[in-house]
Image: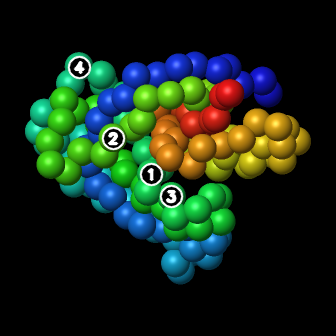
Amino acid sequence: MQPQLQRHKGFNIAGLTVRTSNHTEQEEHSARIGKLWTRFFDERVYAMTPNRVEDMRLYGVYSAYESDAHGPFDLTTGVAVSGGPSAVQVEAGDYLVFAGQGQMPQMVLSLWESIRQYFDQHPEIRRNYRSDFEAYSGPDQVAIHIGVITD
């Protein structure tokens, strides 16, 4: 799997946010991400978010990293918005994009594992741990964008 390097302008996402960590997500009793997505769909947050723009994709935005992949971070499930007090900023910059298609959520979990392996195998490529995001363009399609440092 070879990711594609893309440069993005910053944009805003609004929705629901939870603070978690990869360690927390490994245990079913403490995992928060699945519950957050369930709430997002059950409460139809995607349909009721104010200031929504024409981008119809759904997003999972990883931000407010305490340190790296081992520390806590925020995850916001949401939609693209023009702004607002609760909007999360996806930072402008360079991102490696990993695309996947298949049965949810197994496909996304497998894709994240492939991403971890990719960075383990390419230590010369460094993540910036500022903002990463999943962009869902359909019920079985995702592109995971990982912020990287390019010098």
**Residue kind at label 2, given as amino acid type:** Gln
Residue 134 in percent (x, y) is at: 50, 38
Q: How far apart are labels 3 and 4 at the CA level?
A: 28 Å
Q: On the image, numbered disc 2 is attached to which residue?
A: 89
**Residue kind at label 3, given as amino acid type:** Tyr
Q: Residue at x 37, y 51 (%)?
A: 76
> Mark 1–mark 2 contact, CB under 8 Å?
yes
Q: Is residue 77 above or below residue 97?
A: below
Label whose residue precedes the other's in the sequence (1 or 4): 4
**Residue kind at label 4, given as amino acid type:** Glu
Q: Residue at x 60, y 44 (%)?
A: 128
Q: How far apart are labels 3 and 2 at the CA level?
A: 13 Å
Q: How far apart are labels 4 and 2 at the CA level?
A: 17 Å
Q: On the image, numbered disc 1 is attached to which residue?
A: 63
Secondary structure at badge 1 equals strand
Q: Residue furthest front?
A: 151
**Residue kind at label 1, given as amino acid type:** Ser
Q: Is residue 5 above or below residue 20?
A: above
Q: On the image, numbered disc 4 is attached to which residue?
A: 54
Whether residue 91 is visible, yes or no, is: yes
Label whose residue precedes the other's in the sequence (3 or 4): 4
- How crowded is the residue under tag 1: few (<14 C-alpha within 10 Å), some, or many (20+)? many
Secondary structure at badge 4 equals loop
Quadrant hosting residue 61 = top left
Q: Residue furthest bottom?
A: 29
Is 90 on the left-hand or right-hand side of 1? left
Quadrant hosting residue 4 = top right
Q: Residue at x 64, y 21 (%)?
A: 5
Label whose residue precedes the other's in the sequence (4 or 2): 4
Between circles 1 and 4, the one closer to the viewer is 1
> Mark 3–mark 2 contact, CB under 8 Å?
no
